[in-house]
Amino acid sequence: MTSSAPAAEPRPAVRTEREGAVAVILIDNPPVNAGSLAVREGLLAALTAAASDPSVAAVVIMGDGRSFISGSDLKEFDLPLAEPQLPAVIRAVEDCPKTVVAALHGAALGGGFELALGCDARIATAATVVALPEATLGIIPGAGGTQRLPRMVGTTLAIDLVCSGRRVEAEEALRYGIIDQVAKGNLRAAATALALTLTGRKSLVIERAVPDDGADEEVAAATALKAGRNRPHIAAAIRHVRAARSVPAARALADERADFQRLRVSPEAKAIRHLFFAEREAARGGGLNKVPPRPLARFGVVGAGTMGAGIALAALQTDLSVVLVERDPAALQRGLTTIKAQIARRVETGRLTEADVNAMSARLTAGLDLGTLADCDLIAEAVVEDLAVKTAVFRTLDGLAKPGAVLASNTSYLNLDAIAAATGRPQDVIGLHFFSPAHVMRLLEVVRGKDSAEDALATGLALANRLGKQPVVAGNRFGFIGNRLYAAYRRHCEFMLEEGALPQDVDKALEAFGFAMGPFAVADLSGLDIAWRMRLQQASTRDPAARYVTIPDRLCEMGRLGRKTGAGYYRYKDGPARGAPDPEVEAIILAASADAGRTRHSFTAEEIVRRALLALANEAAVALADGAAMNADDIDVVLVNGYGFPRWAGGPVHWARNEDPGRLISDCDSLVTLAGPGTRRGDLSLLLRPPSARGPVRARG
Ligand code: NAD
C-alpha cells in the first residue's frame, strides 16, 4: 500500500501585496531571482491586474529575497524564448496608466536592470549594484537596454556601461541619474512613499531625445571596441546605442531585439555560456566546496620573488593578514618595492585610498625569519623551482607551523607528493599554482596530492574565492593541467617551424584566431632559459626515439634568451616593441629542418590554427585519462583564464566538441603520426561525451 501526501502548492514566482493604495509586486524566484518565464508571466499578470484595479493608485516592483533580478536564466538562451518575452513586460510597465516605481536591492542586472529602466522611477538601497552584463556573455541587451540607457545618461557613458558590463553601485548610479533616490531605512516603505508622491506621473524614458555627444562618443566607441577585441557583439552594442540618437524608438527597439535574438544563438555566445557554466562547476571542485574549509585569517608567503611578491599583494587586497618571509635581504627589499609600487599605482588610479594603504601596511609583516610564520593558517611557498630547496623549506615549516595549518606549494612542475613527504603531515599539503603576475591572473590551480585532506583542498578553494580567483582542482601530474597542455601546444608549434613555418607565421595565425600573443612571442617575453634549463635536466631521461626540435636549444646556446637579452625568436634591439623577424633565426630554423631531413612546405594560417587546436585537444584527452583534470570542462577554464585562449572560442574542449567527430579523429591521427614517437594519442571520446554523460570524476592525487 502506498500513501502520498498532497503535493505542496508551488510558490508563485510573482505575487502582489498591498500597502494602502500602492500595489507592491514581489518577484520571488530563489535563489537569485533570475528572470525566467514564470517571472515574466507573473509580472505581466500582476501589472495587468494593477492597471485595471481602481483601488490601486501606484505600483512598486521589487524583489523578495536577496536581489531585485540578478539577470536571466542562461539555460533558456539555447532554446527559442517562450512568450511573454521581456520587452512585452516592459511595454506593459510603460503602458500601465499608474506610476510604476522599481525598488532595487542586491543586484539589478541584465533584464532586471532593463525592467527597472522601463519604470517611471528607481529607488535603491545603498548596497545595490546595477549593470548590463550581456556583453560579457557575447550578446547585447535585448529588452531596450541600449535604447533607454543612452536616453538617461547619454551615449558616451551608455557605450562604456553596455560594452564593459561594469557594475555600478547605488551612489554612482545616483550621480548618473540612473536611479532617482538611495533609500534610507526600509526600502519597501521608501518605495511606497515615492510611488505615492509620483502618483499619476509617467516618465517614459523611451520618449526622451538623446543629445549628440560628438567627439566624446567617438572616443568611447573606439575605446570600447578596442577593449572588446573588435568582437561582433561589441560592435553591435555600440551601433545600437548610437542609433538611440537618430532612429525612432520603436524601430531601434525592434532592431536591438533582432540582433539580440541573432547573437544569443551565435557560436561565440554559446562558447562564452559554456565557460560560464564550466567556471561555476570548476569553482565547486567536484563537491569540495561543500566541505567546510579550515579557518583562514593569517596568510604566510615564503619567497618574495616574482611569484611570492604577487601572491602577497593579492592577499593584501583582501582582509587577510600577510606574513612574507625571504631568505635573501636584497630579494626581500625588491619584493617589498614591487608591492609598494603596485599599491601606489592603484592609489594613483583611484582604486585604493590612503586609508586602504594604511590598513594594508598594518596587515603586512615582512622579514627573514621563517619562525614568524608559526601562527599562520595557510603558508604558500614560492621559492625557486628546485626540489631540494622546496623539501628543505617544507621540512622547516613542518617543525614550526601550527597544527592544522595548510602548507601549499606554488611549484609549476615538481611532484607535490615528494614535497609533502618532507613533512610529517602530508594531509595538510596542497598545491596552489598561481600564474604570473599573481595579483592579476585569475586562474589558480588547486593541486591534490595523494594524501591532501579534503578540508585542506577546500581551504584552497575558499582562498581562491577570497582572492577573486578562478580555482580549478588539478591532479598531481607533471605540469598539472595548464602547463602540460601549453607544453604540448608549444611543442607542436615547434614541429611546424621544423616543417616549414616561421615564428611570425605561427604567431600571426594564432593571434588572428584570438590568442593575446602567439607562442613564440610568449616564449620571448617569459624567457627561453626556463624551459631550456628543464630540458637540460631531463636530457638523460628523454626517450631518444622521441621527436625533438633543436631550434630553441640553438637560440639559447647563442644567448638569445628572449626580450631580456634583446633577442630570442625575434630581434628586439632597434626593432619594434613587439620584436622583428630575424634572418639569423630563419637560418637556424632552415638548418634544423635540413638536419632533421625534412622538406619544408608552407602553412596556411588555417592549417597552423587547426594543428595547434588539435594538439591541445589531444593533450586534453591524455590529461583526462591520466587524472590531471577532473573533467573536460575544467581544461577549458584553465586555458581561457591562464593561457590567453580566447574566451569567445570557449577553449580547446569546446572547440573539439563542435568539430565533425570523424574529421577530428582522423586529423588527430595525422597529428600524432606527424609528431612521431613521444606523443601519446588521446582518447577524444573523453572530450566529446555530452555533459550529461560526464559525471564529475575525482582528480587523482
Ligand atoms: P624567483 O626566483 O623570482 O623567486 C624565488 C625567491 O625565493 C627568491 O627571491 C629567493 O631568494 C627565495 N628563496 C629561495 N629559497 C628560499 C628559502 N629557503 N626561504 C625563503 N626564500 C627563499 O622565482 P619565481 O618566479 O617567483 O618562482 C617561484 C615559484 O613559483 C617556483 O616554484 C616557480 O616554478 C613557481 N611559478 C613561477 C611562475 C612564473 O611565471 N615566474 C609561475 C607559476 C609558478
Image: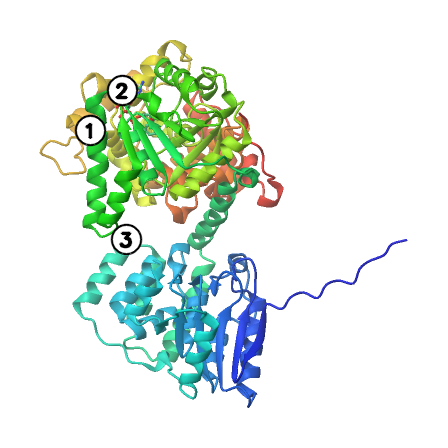
The reply to whether the residue tagged 1 has its Cβ within 8 angstroms of ligand 1 is yes
* Label 1 – label 2 distance at C-alpha: 12 Å
Q: Does residue 393 appear in this view? A: yes
* Label 3 – label 1 distance at C-alpha: 32 Å
Name which residue type carries label 1: Arg
| Quarter of image, res 454 | top right
Q: Residue at x 41, y 20 (%)?
A: 400
Q: Is residue 469 above or below residue 195?
A: above
Disc 2 element: loop
Of tags 2 and 3, which is closer to the observer? 2
* First of labels 2, 3 by sequence position: 3
Of tags 3 and 1, which is closer to the observer? 1
Within 10 angstroms of label 1, few (less than 14), some, or many (20 or more) residues?
A: some
* Coordinates of residue 564 in the picture (x, y in percent): 18, 28
Instruction: Provide the residue designation for mark 3.
Output: 227
Instruction: Provide the residue designation for mark 2.
Output: 327
